[in-house]
Image (cartoon, helix red, strand yellow):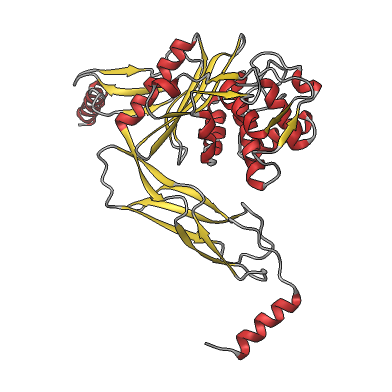
């Protein structure tokens, strides 16, 4: 009897191992499994010539496709994604203004490689230098703005590394602001995608990264023609950024973003053999994302999200509005009826509260399963109230009841 049971068990195992798995489609570790026919699964690498690649939903960071995405590689001028992020954050904080003038130092003017040929002592606006970085990958403008914001390139580089650490980027270290070859200067497709996602929280950046051509020094006899190094902004519908890169070590690199309807994705490829292949493979990544996926908006920028009370603050509560768009990635054809969300705030939030401080969490569910979580940040700073203000507030509640 035992031998009969054993033979039956072995027969079941052999049958299971021989059953074709091509009915299931999924993506993992740089390959997309697709059904070629009923009997055989065909594996397609969407970026076969890239050393490393990543495709994500820009709103959620959900990975759609990846290939060696944590491998540390030379990022070349994609470095400037972090440079532009710090510039945009400085603009947001009011530390610099777009029309503010920048005087070019000897150090900034000495940069080689891609440049807008700044001269020592030349004066140019922050906005024009930002154009030069975003469109022409200007190494000289990157250094000039770094010096304007922090006083020296070295301090700015330190801030770049601090910001990378804050974003949880474990495969990144910067040694300069522009991506010229340097010791201990590296990143990964994953980290570049996350930097790009953070940069896109400043929507005005695409005003510069998405423009195909423009001019600098219009008021002079020798205007400088800018042509975007990212040709996809002209040749792929919906592309409006972000940054190309090339050195002999890094080869041809690109972090690009495209949006169709309300669905924005980010594709990163590193180590491509030439620009034609680089652009073709990024286009293929975009084609895959837009044909297979969509997203569902939860909040649009500016939508009210609720009110959070602040204990002992100079204001008693903060009205929270979505700073940017929140959405979830869905496979096309998925039912939307069982998608729900909730916002939970810290129950005992005490002053002082700083701008950008986490004060709650937005959670999105499909049925009972959590499919996305977002940190909710304070849009304003709340100082601690004076004892006199707290006393008046307390007595007011005691003697002037509703």
Q: Is residue 288 left or right of residue 148?
A: left
The residue positioned 33% from the left and 18% from the top of the image is 43
In this view of the protein, can residue 82 be seen by the observer? yes
The residue positioned 73% from the left and 32% from the top of the image is 102
Nearer to the camera, 4 or 19? 19
| In this view, 268 is above or below 342 | above
Q: Is residue 109 left or right of residue 299?
A: right
Nearer to the camera, 21 or 346? 346
The residue positioned 75% from the left and 76% from the top of the image is 387
- x, y percent for residue 260: 36, 34
- x, y percent for residue 165: 66, 37
Furthest toward the bottom, the residue is 399
Q: Is residue 28 left or right of residue 252?
A: left
Q: Quadrant of residue 46?
A: top left
Q: Quadrant of residue 391?
A: bottom right
| In this view, 191 is above or below 326 | above
- x, y percent for residue 109: 75, 19
Nearer to the camera, 378 or 9? 378
The residue positioned 66% from the left and 82% from the top of the image is 394
Q: Is residue 398 left or right of residue 64?
A: right
- x, y percent for residue 266: 46, 30
């Amino acid at each position: 009897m035992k031998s009969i049971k054993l033979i039956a068990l072995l027969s079941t195992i052999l049958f299971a191992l021989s059953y074709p798995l091509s009915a299931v489609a999924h993506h993992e570790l740089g390959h997309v499994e697709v059904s070629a026919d009923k009997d055989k699964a065909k594996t397609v690498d969407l970026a076969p010539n890239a050393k490393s690649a990543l495709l994500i939903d820009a709103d959620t960071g959900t990975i759609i496709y990846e290939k060696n995405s944590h491998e540390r590689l030379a990022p070349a001028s994609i470095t400037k994604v972090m440079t532009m992020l710090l510039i945009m954050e400085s603009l947001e904080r009011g530390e610099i203004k777009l029309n503010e003038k920048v005087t070019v130092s000897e150090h900034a003017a000495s940069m080689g490689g891609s440049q807008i040929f700044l001269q020592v002592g030349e004066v140019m606006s922050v906005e024009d230098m930002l154009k030069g970085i975003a469109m022409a990958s200007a190494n000289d403008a990157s250094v000039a703005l770094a010096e304007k914001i922090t006083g020296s390139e070295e301090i700015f580089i330190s801030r770049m590394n601090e910001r990378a650490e804050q974003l949880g980027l474990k495969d990144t270290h910067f040694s300069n602001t522009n991506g010229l070859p340097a010791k201990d200067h590296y990143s990964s497709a994953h980290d570049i995608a996350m930097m790009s996602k953070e940069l896109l929280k400043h929507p005005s950046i695409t005003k510069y990264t998405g423009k195909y051509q423009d001019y600098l020094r219009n008021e002079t006899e020798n205007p400088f023609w800018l042509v975007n190094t990212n040709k996809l902004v002209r040749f792929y519908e919906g592309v409006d950024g972000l940054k190309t890169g090339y050195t002999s070590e890094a080869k041809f690199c690109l972090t690009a973003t495209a949006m169709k309807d309300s669905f924005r994705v980010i594709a990163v490829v590193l180590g491509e053999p030439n620009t034609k292949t680089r652009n073709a493979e990024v286009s293929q990544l975009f084609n895959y994302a837009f044909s297979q996926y969509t997203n569902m908006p939860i909040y649009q920028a500016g939508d009210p999200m609720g009110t959070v009370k602040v204990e002992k603050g100079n204001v008693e509560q903060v009205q929270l509005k979505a700073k940017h768009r929140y959405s979830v990635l869905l496979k096309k054809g998925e039912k939307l009826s069982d998608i729900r969300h909730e916002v939970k705030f810290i129950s005992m939030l005490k002053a002082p509260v700083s701008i950008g401080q986490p004060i709650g969490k937005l959670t999105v569910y499909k049925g009972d399963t959590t499919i996305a979580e977002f940190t909710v940040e304070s849009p304003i700073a709340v100082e601690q109230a004076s004892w006199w203000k707290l006393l008046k507030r307390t007595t007011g509640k005691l003697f002037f009841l509703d």
